Every structure is written in C-alpha cells, then in structure tokens.
Image (cartoon, rainbow, N blue to C red):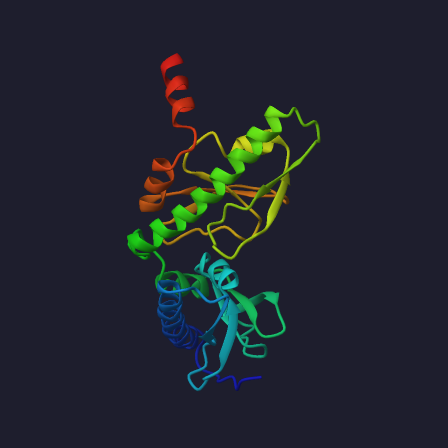
Amino acid sequence: MLERTREPTRERQARIARNEAAFRQTNEEIEALNSSGARAARFPIVCECGSENCAEVIMVAAAEYDTVRGDPHRFLIKPGHEFPDVEDVVDRRADFVVVEKKPGLPQQLAEESDPRSGEDAVSPAVARRIAENESRFRDANERIEEAVLEHEITAFTMPFVCECGREECLKTLRLTLAEYELARQDPRLFLCIPGHEVVGAGIGRLVRESSKFVIVEKIGVAGDVAEARDPRPADREEALGAG
C-alpha cells in the first residue's frame, strides 16, 4: 500500500484530487493519440491514483478506458493504490482497479477536473467518427430485422449487433422485436451491451437501462451525424405527415 499522510482532510483531498486530475488529463492525451491512428486494442496509461510519487503504468483495453471515462467520479489505478477514505473500489481486475469517489467533496473535486466535461471536451472529428461507427452497426441491425419480418421468423428473441461504435466490438444482444424497436423510435438512439455505452463529453447520454441492454441518445455533433444517417427517414416523414 502507498504511504498515507495525515494532512487535514480537506487539504489532503484537494491535493489527491490535483494529482489525480493531472494523471487523468495525461491519459486523455494518450488515448487521443491512440484514437488518431489505427487504434490499438490495448494501450498504456499512467496510474490515476493521488500519490505524487506514483509512476506506475497500466495496460487497458480501449473499451475499458472509455467506460471509466464516461463517469467523472471514476479513476483507473493500480491494485493497492486506493485511498479508502475518499474512494470505493467498484471493479477489480488483475492489472487494475476502478475506484469511485465518495459523495461530497471527493466527487465535487473529481467533477471540477473532469477532462470530458462540457460540449467541447471531445473534438467534432472524434464525435463524428464514433457516430459513424454506431450508424454502420445500426444499419446492420435494420437488415437483420428486415430479414426476420420478411421470412416470418417466430423465435422469441433475435440476435442484434451492439451499436456502441467501437470498431473492435463484435458483441451481440438477443432482443425481442419490441425491445429493438424501442431504440428505433428516434434517429439519435442506439442499442448497446451494458457497459459499452459511450456517454458524456458532449457525445451522448444514457436514456434507458436494463440487464439486457442500454439505450444511448447521441447529442451534439454525434447526434447530428446519427440523424443524418437515419436508416428510416421515409418512415418518419410519413408519420409526421399522418400527424
């Protein structure tokens, strides 16, 4: 375990938060470089613990990193680097743990230093790339549903591909047609495996959650791309005309 000092609580929490924010910002720059080229399945980040003398490196999958960055209260750290008085462990892996800041001052400080807060936290180019990937998966799911309806397949659930937008994701969801249609009511909605949602940072927000799937609404530039790539524009125009 790292050495714990006995500074006054507020000062100590602020110091830890400053250190964590610096490490988290560095990791955002590393992730941006990784995303700008052929995105590696796993890449190195620095431990985001609050210790000034920590220089540990963690290997994480792109999907794991994005999931943690979707919540401003969460950080990726090496096992044993936890500060139990200001954070709780919410996920433990062999190479790293995910911690969540406790309510109150710890969460407030984490939110204030969130590198993905605000509409401009992610560049329009990155938001566009994510939305275009998601739209391709959505198009594939539309073809799956068309085949089901055309051939009058009577199975209770059907396989649909996760629409999370990550190029490396090949996961599928088994859904009823009614569940699938929940996400086709609006061109900005996408279906994902729980945990695969890309939210925050002016890209999207979670609008429905269940044990089987989540539905994410794209916002900002990502929402504009999603709407432009709507696979059902004629259907929506007809519905508006009928109203």
Which residue does the image show at 47% across and 55% down from the upper left? 167
Residue 86 visible in the picture: no
Q: Nearer the viewer, residue 47 or 168?
A: 168
Furthest residue to the top?
A: 242
Task: Give coordinates of residue 243: x percent, y percent.
Answer: 39, 14
Q: Nearer the viewer, residue 208 or 180?
A: 180
Task: Give coordinates of residue 18: x percent, y percent.
Answer: 37, 74
Q: Is residue 123 left or right of residue 44?
A: left
Q: Is residue 30 left or right of residue 78?
A: left
Task: Give coordinates of residue 4: x percent, y percent.
Answer: 51, 84
Count of marks placed on residues:
0
Q: Is residue 18 above or below residue 148?
A: below
Which residue does the image show at 71% across and 31% down from the upper left? 155
Task: Give coordinates of residue 55: x percent, y percent.
Answer: 45, 84
Which residue does the image show at 32% across and 44% down from the upper left? 220
Q: Is residue 110 above or below residue 220?
A: below
Which residue does the image show at 55% across and 43% down from the upper left? 214
On the image, which quarter does residue 210 sit in?
Answer: top right
Residue 112 visible in the picture: yes
Q: Nearer the viewer, residue 12 or 127?
A: 127
Query: Which quadrant: the N terminus?
Result: bottom right
